[in-house]
C-alpha cells in the first residue's frame, strides 16, 4: 500500500487554503505550519506566494527559516511558489528589502523580485512543460507580481517549464533540484493540480 505523505503549508501569508485543497486533491494529508515545532514529521512543505519580505519578517521571531533548512537537510521536500521561490533561491538580485532577515536558500538559482510587473500587470498564460504528469497538456499559470529566474546556476537544476517575457525572451518558471521544486507563478489558483501531484510524489519518495 502506498504511504500517504503529510505536507505542511507555511501559513504566515498567502493562498494557504488553495494550496491545501490542491494537496488534498493530490492525495496528501495537510498541516498548517506557523511554528518550528509543527515541521516535525512532515514529508514536505509548501512555501506559498504572498510578499516575500512580509513572510521573512513574520518567520524571524520564531526562527522558522533555519528550522525549515534543518528539516530539509533531514529529508523534507520543499515547494516554493512565487514568494516561496524567492525565499528558497540562493541569490536574490534585488534583496535590499530582505536584508537582515533569514531565508531558506538552497535552491541554486538567481532570481529578481516582482520582475513581471506590478499587481496591475498580473496575467494568465499556458505553459509547455517537461517531466510533470501528463506533460503533453499545457499547464495554466497565474502570474502575480512574479519573480524572474535570471540564472540557473546548479548543474543539477532541471527546468520543467519556461515562459516568454516580451523582448526579454524566455525564462524558466518551474525548476526542480532534487526534492526541491519551485515556480514563479501561483499553481494553486488554477484547477490544474499537476505540480502539486509532482510534489506529493517527491515528498513520498
Image (cartoon, rainbow, N blue to C red):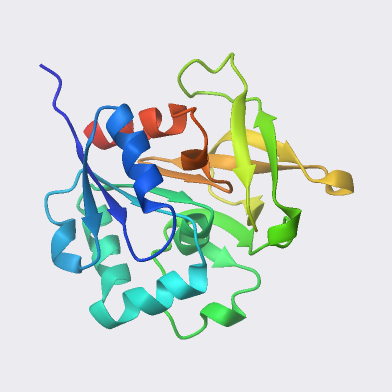
Residue 21 image position (x, y, % from top left): 34, 38
Direction from residue 179 to residue 38 in the image, left or right:
left
**The N terminus lies in quadrant:** top left
Decide which of 98, 156 is in the foreground and name it: 98
Is residue 97 or residue 117 the one in the foreground?
117
Q: Position of residue 17 (x, y in %)?
A: 35, 48
Placement of the C terminus among the 4 image quadrants: top left
Name the quadrant containing residue 56: bottom left
> From the viewer's perspective, is 174 left or right of 198?
right
The reply to whether residue 156 is in sight is: no
Let me know if residue 72 appears in the view. yes
Give the residue furthest to the right: 167
Q: Looking at the picture, does residue 159 appear above or below residue 107?
A: above
Residue name at image x 18 percent, y 48 percent: 42
Residue found at x 43% / y 54%: 48
Observer-nearest residue: 44 or 142?
Answer: 142
Please identify the quarter of the rendering in which residue 92 is found. Answer: bottom right
The image quadrant of residue 161 is top right
Residue 154 lies, with reference to residue 118, above or below; the image says: above
In the image, what residue occupies the spot 62% across and 59% down? 111
Q: Is residue 197 above or below residue 137?
A: below
Q: How many marks?
A: 0
Residue at horizontal 20%, vertical 68%?
35
Residue 124 locus on image (x, y percent): 68, 39
Observer-nearest of 197 and 99: 197
Residue furthest to the bottom: 100
Amino acid at each position: 500500500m502506498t504511504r500517504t505523505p503529510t505536507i505542511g503549508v507555511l501559513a504566515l501569508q498567502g493562498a494557504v487554503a488553495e494550496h491545501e485543497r490542491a494537496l488534498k486533491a493530490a492525495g496528501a494529508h495537510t498541516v498548517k505550519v506557523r511554528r518550528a515545532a509543527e515541521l516535525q514529521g512532515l514529508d514536505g512543505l509548501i512555501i506559498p506566494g504572498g510578499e516575500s519580505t512580509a513572510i521573512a519578517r513574520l518567520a524571524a521571531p520564531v526562527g522558522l527559516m533555519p528550522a525549515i533548512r534543518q528539516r530539509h537537510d533531514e529529508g523534507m521536500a520543499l515547494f516554493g511558489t512565487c514568494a516561496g521561490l524567492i525565499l528558497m533561491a540562493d541569490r536574490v538580485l534585488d534583496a535590499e528589502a530582505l536584508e537582515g532577515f533569514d531565508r531558506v536558500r538552497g535552491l541554486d538559482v538567481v532570481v529578481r523580485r516582482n520582475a513581471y510587473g506590478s499587481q496591475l500587470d498580473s496575467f494568465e498564460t499556458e505553459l509547455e512543460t517537461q517531466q510533470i504528469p501528463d506533460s503533453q497538456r499545457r499547464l495554466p499559470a497565474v502570474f502575480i507580481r512574479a519573480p524572474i529566474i535570471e540564472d540557473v546556476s546548479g548543474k543539477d537544476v532541471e527546468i520543467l517549464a519556461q515562459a516568454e517575457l516580451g523582448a526579454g525572451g524566455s525564462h524558466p518558471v518551474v525548476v526542480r533540484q532534487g526534492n526541491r521544486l519551485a515556480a514563479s507563478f501561483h499553481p494553486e489558483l488554477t484547477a490544474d493540480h499537476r505540480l502539486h501531484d509532482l510534489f506529493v510524489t517527491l515528498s513520498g519518495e
